[in-house]
Image (cartoon, helix red, strand yellow):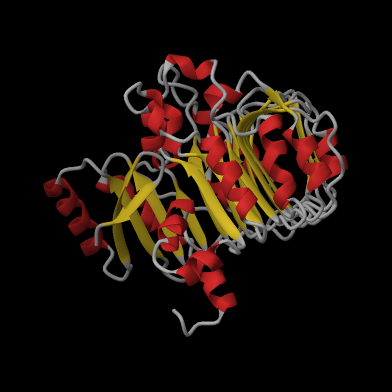
């Protein structure tokens, strides 16, 4: 290490996972100790062990408060460009009764942020804060106002597990990536997001509460991940250059997608509403749909003829309500995507489609000229249904596709071997691959 130039050593130290590793390095040599204070990035994480010791009377006095550690470390690191502060994931699930009133781990507390941010704000380009929800959920924080006033060159901002106010928020023209995860957000229509973050290219809104009529209107946005857990009245996304969208919502009264450049769409809508305004996606290549109303969604997207990869899964309303047959798409509707290269069916989608195969052969007018891979997830091993389905696919494909079959993980080995043997012997020209699934598409290969 002594022969390496200082800038290279600093860069290596900047890739350490957290401040504890950096502290251990400082004990090894004077050179590393000196250079460690010039690292461009650091992660300050309150571990579960530290959290638990701070809550036990026998060890509480021996533990330095985490906020004091954060303040001390940041004041010593004058070259920081990337900063990550947070509470370890497992610690957030292990809490005592006293946590609600305490604020020792409320990391977006305005007074706390104001003590250390001025030391690094001038150079900071990436900032990530994971708050302790038990303490932050009932304390609104104007941390966005503090950050927007101080961090003029910030490009990446992630805020997790907090109640965020937009009072005093100022424009941040350099910010290109924003993540709000498990946030109670006081911007019910996202007006301040649109006005203050005009240069955003990546936006992730994961489980953000407090939204009523949210509208995202960002001219430079290219990637968006939006998970809406509450029943927002309407959702509007206007982004002319958006390339990739993952949208997970329940049943909005109105959905507007004005994203003509979209190439990748992952859309989960439990039930279709009466008011959908979706522009034609001529450049759409990859499409995943999870819904109770797959048939309606597919017809809505029928002009997206250039789709090459299609994944379908039928959602359930609940254990007490059966799947409605009308909500599943038909094979005629699958023919609306003539350029498919990959077709994947989730376990419930497969069960519903499998019901159409009776004793008579099903023949349709279309052909898949480019289909190369068929992926199915099976709940029940029914060879007759599989035989008819594969026969149908082969009749409607110019070339024989590879068939990837994922079987429920708890199927016995004897039944599995018999099923595999029948499939392979009946279609020897097909290239088969086998795997198992558990939960929500938790795939792993068997052979």
The image shows residue 271 at horizontal and vertical percentages of 61, 28
The image shows residue 358 at horizontal and vertical percentages of 36, 41
Question: In this rendering, would 81 be left or right of 366?
Answer: right
Residue extending farthest left:
414
Residue drawn 45% across and 21% down?
A: 318
- Camera-nearest residue between 427 and 12: 12
Residue drawn 18% across and 58% down?
A: 421
Residue 124 in which image quadrant: bottom right
The image shows residue 130 at horizontal and vertical percentages of 57, 38
Residue 293 in which image quadrant: top right
Residue 371: tell me if it is visible: no
Count of numbered circles on the image: 0
Task: Examine the rendered structure and indicate whether residue 102 appears above or below residue 225.
Answer: above
Residue 21: tell me if it is visible: yes
Question: In this rendering, would 365 be left or right of 196?
Answer: left
- Camera-nearest residue between 12 and 176: 12
- Camera-nearest residue between 326 and 12: 12
Question: Where does the C terminus fall, quadrant-wise?
Answer: bottom left
The image shows residue 36 at horizontal and vertical percentages of 53, 63
Residue drawn 78% across and 38% down?
A: 146
Residue drawn 62% across and 29% down?
A: 162
Question: Where does the N terminus fall, quadrant-wise?
Answer: bottom left
Residue extending farthest front:
30
Question: In this rendering, would 7 be left or right of 212?
Answer: left
Task: Examine the rendered structure and indicate whether residue 241 appears above or below residue 206.
Answer: below
Residue extending farthest bottom:
3
């Amino acid at each position: 290490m002594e022969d390496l130039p200082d800038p290279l050593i600093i860069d290596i130290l900047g890739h350490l996972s957290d401040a504890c590793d950096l502290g251990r390095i400082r004990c090894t040599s004077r050179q590393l100790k000196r250079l460690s204070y010039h690292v461009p990035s650091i992660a300050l994480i309150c571990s579960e062990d530290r959290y638990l010791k701070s809550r036990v009377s026998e060890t509480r006095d021996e533990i330095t408060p985490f906020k004091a550690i954060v303040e001390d470390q940041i004041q010593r690191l004058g070259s920081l460009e990337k900063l990550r502060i947070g509470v370890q994931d497992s610690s957030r699930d292990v809490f005592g009764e006293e946590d609600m009133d305490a604020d020792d781990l409320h990391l977006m507390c305005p007074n706390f942020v104001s003590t250390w941010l001025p030391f690094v704000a001038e150079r900071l380009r990436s900032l990530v804060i994971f708050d302790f929800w038990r303490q932050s959920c009932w304390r609104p924080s104007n941390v966005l106002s503090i950050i927007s006033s101080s961090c003029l060159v910030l490009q990446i901002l992630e805020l997790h597990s907090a109640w965020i106010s937009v009072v005093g928020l100022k424009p941040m023209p350099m910010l290109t990536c924003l993540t709000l995860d498990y946030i109670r957000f006081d911007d019910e229509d996202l007006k301040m997001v649109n006005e203050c973050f005009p240069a955003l290219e990546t936006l992730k809104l994961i489980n953000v509460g407090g939204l009523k009529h949210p509208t995202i209107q960002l001219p430079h946005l290219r990637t968006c991940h939006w998970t809406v857990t509450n029943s927002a009245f309407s959702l509007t996304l206007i982004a002319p250059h958006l390339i990739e969208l993952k949208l997970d919502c329940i049943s909005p009264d109105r959905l507007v997608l004005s994203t003509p450049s979209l190439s990748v769409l992952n859309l989960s809508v439990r039930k279709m509403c009466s008011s959908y305004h979706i522009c034609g996606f001529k450049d759409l290549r990859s499409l995943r749909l999870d819904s109770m109303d797959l048939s309606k969604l597919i017809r809505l997207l029928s002009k997206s003829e250039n789709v090459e990869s299609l994944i379908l899964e039928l959602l359930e309303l609940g254990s007490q309500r059966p799947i409605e047959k009308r909500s599943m798409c038909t094979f005629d509707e699958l023919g609306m995507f003539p350029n498919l290269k990959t077709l994947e069916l989730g376990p419930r989608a497969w069960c519903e489609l499998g019901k159409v195969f009776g004793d008579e052969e099903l023949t349709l007018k279309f052909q898949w000229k480019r289909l190369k891979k068929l992926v199915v997830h099976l709940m029940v091993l029914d060879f007759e249904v599989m035989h008819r389905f594969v026969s149908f696919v082969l009749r409607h494909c110019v070339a024989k596709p590879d068939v990837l079959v994922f079987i429920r993980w708890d199927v016995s080995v004897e039944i599995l071997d018999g099923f595999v043997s029948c499939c392979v012997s009946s279609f020897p020209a097909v290239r088969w691959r086998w795997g198992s699934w558990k939960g929500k598409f938790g795939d792993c290969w068997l052979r």
